[in-house]
């Protein structure tokens, strides 16, 4: 399951992931993976990877970090700044676009695969 998070700096991408993790029962701290590029979580029998690729510089860095191995079909991915890794990361099941508006945020969610549509249906 691959979820792309689009939106300007401060749009609320990390806050959304924090909300999902908390809703699943995670009580630890959810840090922004700004410098580590990825933070792993195991909660509710799910392996979740939260990427922030804003500071990803090139493909060599991606390979050296071993990120390719992360995408083995067993994890759920929330990816901030996916546009930095086009061609390296799988296509999304869901695309979430966040926009700052005067009294909060506008969020658009688009399902791109049958898996994505299944997730969107209850919403
Ligand atoms: N839905 C929201 N409504 C109001 N403020 C928000 C919302 N989502 C996030 N924020 C605030 O915006 C700031 C930046 O959010 P963050 O999730 O770090 O953004 P991003 O990861 O997109 O750069 C934080 O101070 C957060 O509390
Ligand atoms: Mg963020």
Image (cartoon, rainbow, N blue to C red):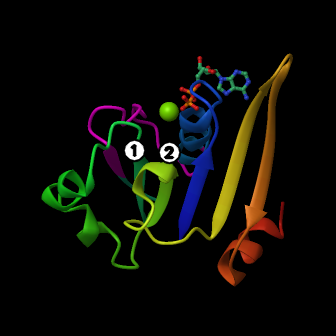
Q: Where residue 40 appears, x then y in whole percent?
A: 33, 51
Badge 1, how many Cα within 10 Å: few under 14, some, many 20+? many
Asked if 53 appears above or below 47 in the picture, the reply is above
Toward which corner of the image does residue 123 lie, by quadrant?
Answer: bottom right
Q: Is mark 2 within 8 Å of ligand 2?
A: no
The answer to whether marks 1 and 2 mark residues whose Cβ atoms lie closer than 8 Å is yes
Q: Please tell me which residue lies in front, 16 or 56.
A: 56
N-term mark: 1 or 2:
1
107 left or right, relative to 33:
right
* 102 within the magenta span: no
Which residue occupies 42% across, 66% down?
A: 89
Segment tinted magenta in the rendering: 23-40
Q: Which residue is mark 1?
A: 53
Q: Is residue 114 above or below residue 76?
A: below
Q: Secondary structure at mark 1?
A: loop
Residue holding disc 2: 81
Q: Decide whether residue 29 is among the magenta residues.
A: yes
What number of labels is visible? Answer: 2
């Amino acid at each position: 399951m691959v979820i792309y998070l689009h939106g300007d700096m401060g749009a609320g991408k990390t806050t959304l992931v924090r909300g999902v993790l908390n809703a699943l029962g995670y009580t630890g701290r959810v840090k922004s993976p700004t410098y580590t590029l990825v933070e792993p979580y195991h909660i509710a029998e799910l392996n979740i990877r939260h990427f922030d690729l804003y500071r990803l510089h090139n493909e060599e860095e991606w390979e050296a970090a071993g990120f390719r191995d992360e995408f083995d079909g067993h994890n759920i991915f929330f990816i901030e700044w996916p546009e930095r890794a086009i061609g390296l990361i799988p296509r999304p099941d869901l695309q979430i676009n966040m926009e700052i508006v005067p009294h909060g945020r506008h969020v658009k969610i688009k399902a791109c695969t049958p898996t994505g549509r299944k997730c969107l249906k209850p919403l």
